[in-house]
Image (cartoon, coloured by chain):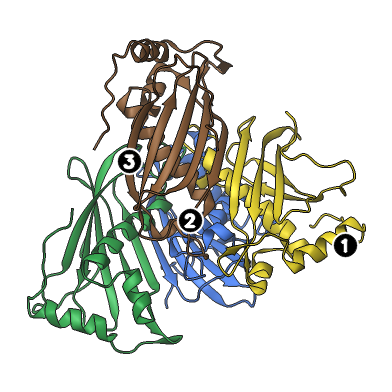
Chain colours: A yellow, B green, C brown, D blue
Amino acid sequence: MKGYFTNSPDAPAPLTCTVERKVRFEEVDPMNIVWHGRYPGYFEDGRVTLGDMYGIGYLDLFRYGVAAPIKKMQIDYIKPLHFGETFSIETLLHWTEAARMNFEFIIRNSTGEKTTTGCTVQLFIKDDELMMFQPDFFAELCEKWKAGALPSADPQ
Amino acid sequence: MKGYFTNSPDAPAPLTCTVERKVRFEEVDPMNIVWHGRYPGYFEDGRVTLGDMYGIGYLDLFRYGVAAPIKKMQIDYIKPLHFGETFSIETLLHWTEAARMNFEFIIRNSTGEKTTTGCTVQLFIKDDELMMFQPDFFAELCEKWKAGALPSADPQ
Amino acid sequence: MKGYFTNSPDAPAPLTCTVERKVRFEEVDPMNIVWHGRYPGYFEDGRVTLGDMYGIGYLDLFRYGVAAPIKKMQIDYIKPLHFGETFSIETLLHWTEAARMNFEFIIRNSTGEKTTTGCTVQLFIKDDELMMFQPDFFAELCEKWKAGALPSADPQ
Amino acid sequence: MKGYFTNSPDAPAPLTCTVERKVRFEEVDPMNIVWHGRYPGYFEDGRVTLGDMYGIGYLDLFRYGVAAPIKKMQIDYIKPLHFGETFSIETLLHWTEAARMNFEFIIRNSTGEKTTTGCTVQLFIKDDELMMFQPDFFAELCEKWKAGALPSADPQ
């Protein structure tokens, strides 16, 4: 499977983080596997963590008066997860100069196998208008990102 | 089991409505029954319908600048519900002169058996203050209710 | 936007159904719109209804000892939905001779605008093995479908 | 408020554990607080953790062929929780010689204030019959519990 996003060769490496989670009882369906509709929430767990690390989380956006609605989501299901299983959500924010956030997600079970991958694309909205250019706070992040001036350490 | 609320003998009959629902796949747990934590949502389906019938729904409250947070909830589980099963939610708003809404819920399966009962108690908040008296719109409803001037027909 | 699936010119028309729903309070997020992660459940509401109409629902599959896990899902968000809003879910099962079910979904608000579209792809599994050919019950449906011998009426 | 359960004076102290959680975006409602219907899931996070600590979790029950359905739940809402807030779930399994599990829950925000309390009561079912006496694995736990032979350390 090729990547969800095409990065130009001179793009800086994605910003990444990995969070650990455990499957909760209410997330499991009668087939004894995580219901396919829970994965948007898992992706969001990753996106929220990365957003908080880099000052582009929901509360940051709210403070800047900017909304970043999800425009598109894709999920590829490879293997199921079961009740009580520990898994990790690797989140990658891919470089782009457009006014959007391109997130990729890789979920792995406790033996390291990829069980689910996916992506979300978010646009920026201010005063009910779609923004054609990156909002300032995001443009500033991108500048540091390109300059290699961002911390890359994982949380936890 | 006695009732969740004690009504004085001269209280007018509860306001009621009944909505029909079908168990959705995502509501069922690995035991093949509706997960116990879905019932607050079923109760809310009933409360929202009754609220809309009598002008005391979420959007009405919002318009009046009043919030009505849930203070207490109790659920008694009698029989399970299964995927695809049709059930009804009978909702009763019990009379009270206090600044609160006392709701009772009776869920029945398609053969009419009670499967779950419960109640919620809501208080009223305005400008971040707990209201000691009923907000006007609710007091007006109560006046008509006591006078027997409210429609009692079920929706649908 | 072109379609999610490419149909050969001589493929029979998709099987379709449309269900009506109302946004529930618990489906709405702090932005006052339906949380993007609720749409897999809306799609499932449509898929379950169509499955029941044509004998290929969850309980039918269970009876045949076949599982049909979701392999892939895509969602495109066009406009938001709000609390209490009525919307419709049009579900289309596209023709294919492969051992899979290709579903497309079109959600429209009460004024008929498309608010969300998407698709799911399901494969068939029997005895823990991916099926290379359609299971009998599905092949039989396809035969009637191709022969134009299926009812096309919408439910409700 | 008095306790949810009345313990006899010579009962051993409750078994307890405390888990830390963070409010997820999908748990928050349009009032910007955790939707009241998410708390059964928070309680379950606590119950699952304690169950795993003492060998009476869902998977243990499954292994013993015993189900422990929730018979009753009560929730008291004191203060709201908000998006991103860290909170703790203290779970207490109260002593009883009856064939049931009496759990109490105390949720506290990051400043240590109680925000929500509640309880669940579970019964035991084997071969579709309500058990009148404690299943063996639970009776054995109770014996050690009464003898003071159980670890009391918190996980994490």
- Provide the chain ID for the residue under circle 3: C
Q: Are marks 3 and 1 on the same chain?
A: no
Which quadrant of the view contains residue D151?
bottom right
Q: Are marks 2 and 1 on the same chain?
A: no
| Amino acid tagged 3 | Val
Q: In this view, does D23 lie above or below C97?
A: below
Sequence-first tag of 3 and 2 = 3
- Mark linked to residue D12: none
- Residue at the (33%, 37%) spot, across then down: C18
Secondary structure beneath dot 2 equals loop
Disc 2 to disc 1, C-alpha distance: 33 Å
Which residue was labeled with disc 2? C80
In this rendering, position of residue C47 left or right of residue A65: left
One can see residue D104 in this view: yes
Badge 3 vs badge 2, beta-carbon distance below 8 Å? no
**Relative image position of residue A42 (x, y in whole percent):** 62, 48
**Relative image position of residue C69 (x, y in whole percent):** 52, 28
- Provide the chain ID for the residue under circle 1: A
Secondary structure beneath dot 1 equals helix
